[in-house]
Amino acid sequence: MKLKLFAIAAFLFFSQQIFSQDSYLKVAAKDSTKVYTGGIKYEVKTFPQKFEAKKPQNVIMMIGDGMGLAQVFAALTANGGQLYLDNFKHIGFSKTQSSDDFITDSAAGGTALSTGQKTYNGAIGVNTDTVAIKTILEMAEDKGLATGLVSTSAITHATPASYIAHQGSRGSYEDIAADFMKTDIDVFIGGGYKHFTQRKDGRDLTRDLQHNGYQVLRDMDEIARVKSGKLAGLIADEHNDVYPNRKMDLPRSTETALNILGQNKKGFFIMVEGSQIDWGGHANNTIYVVNETLDFDRAIGKALEFAAKDGETLIIVTADHETGGMAVVGGDLKSGMVKGAYTTGGHSAIMVPIFSYGPGAENFTGIMENTDIAKNIIRLLGL
């Protein structure tokens, strides 16, 4: 009996350690959440397909966390059969497996996309021996390019963290925040304010950021007014709220970051994440999935506006993995109604799409390893 109680206690302890980082997930079981009944549709612009350069000077990496083909088609249906993604004529697929599991998590998936190396689930910017791997963002900094991160989660969460931090565990939020201080990133916008301020070590990293020349802002309108200089936009204490309730505006944040980074004549690299597509998948909530995917697509529209005008910018849109094992089992293109079904409350192992637009887009077609996406970006930017 004692042995059995010990085993149960141990299981609960380790489960808490493993899953405490996922406390942001909102589980919903009502049947009504499986159906998106329709909403206000937005017009999608068509952008030119001819570009000034053969190789990009700038790269905009856009990650729809948990976004598989079903999530894309659900959003397309909801918007009357069109998305900004329609502008992407080069399409491929990414295999997402991590080094230690057939089903990856966002940390290992993000690290593969940021470094070109597979690693274990939970790892942030480190290899299987927990040794730091230089990321694309850090390589870009070394070459004098401007850099940025935008995320609807905490900026210290797994995907954005994998581009700027080096930690053995994705749950080390305060250590990840401290890793921001070791870089010269130009712009970052997301949540996670308390990981910079309410820390066990007593440090207020926002003061250090201000000392280093950053404008540290918490209001979306103030952030959107910034035209130059270094910017740290920390809108939420932890994660931003669900769309449309959150104070952060992903399309505006994307536009603001691009306008600032675009002033660097050497070029830039930025990663923009639509984080909560994943959370909707975990909740098996079609309304959540559709709203977040549409919000992400509108941010893609801002990236396309910049890239089409610039002519030297490559946009890559992909996912770290699919979430929910989602299927679209009903819908109406006229009303925008979408009915979803799900096979899991976790991630699935299926390939995820890669959409690319701009000079060098032809390098991201066919079936690829997720690590090849990073390797191709590194090669195209000459990092």
Image: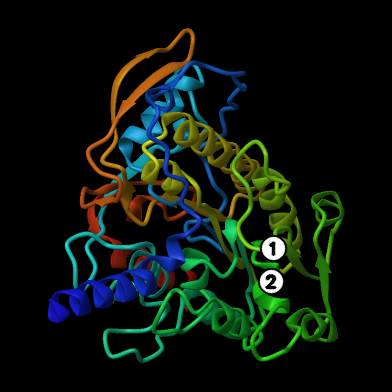
Element under disc 2: helix
Q: Nearer the viewer, residue 147 or 224?
A: 224
**Pick the front one: 34 or 225:** 34
Identity of the amino acid at label 1?
Asp
Q: Position of residue 25 (x, y in %)?
A: 46, 52
Q: Which mark is residue 304?
A: none
- Count of numbered marks: 2
**Residue farthest to the top, as pictured:** 334
Q: Quadrant of the N terminus?
A: bottom left
How many residues crowd around disc 2 within 10 Å: few (fewer than 14), some, or many (20 or more)? some
Q: Which residue is mark 2?
A: 194
Q: CA distance from mark 2 to mark 1?
A: 5 Å
Q: Is residue 35 visible?
A: yes
Please report contact status of discs 2 and 1: CB closer than 8 Å, yes or no. Answer: yes
- Asked which quadrant contains residue 173, the reply is bottom right
In the shown orientation, is residue 37 left or right of residue 19? right
Q: Is residue 23 above or below residue 15?
A: above
- Counting from the top left corner in percent of width and height, residue 51 is at 54, 47
Instruction: Name the secondary structure under disc 1.
Output: loop
- Place residue 122 in its image quadrant: bottom left
At x 31%, y 84%, the residue is 127
Disc 1: which residue: 237
- Report whether residue 382 is seen: no
Q: Residue at x 60, y 66 (%)?
A: 155
Three-letter code for the amino acid on which mark 2 is drawn:
Lys
Percent across and percent down for residue 239 are 60, 57
Mark earlier in primary sequence (2, 1): 2
Other residues around mark 1 within 10 Å, as few (<14) / some (14–19) / many (≥20): some
Task: Give the residue drawn at x 71%, y 72%.
Answer: 186
Identify the coloring.
rainbow
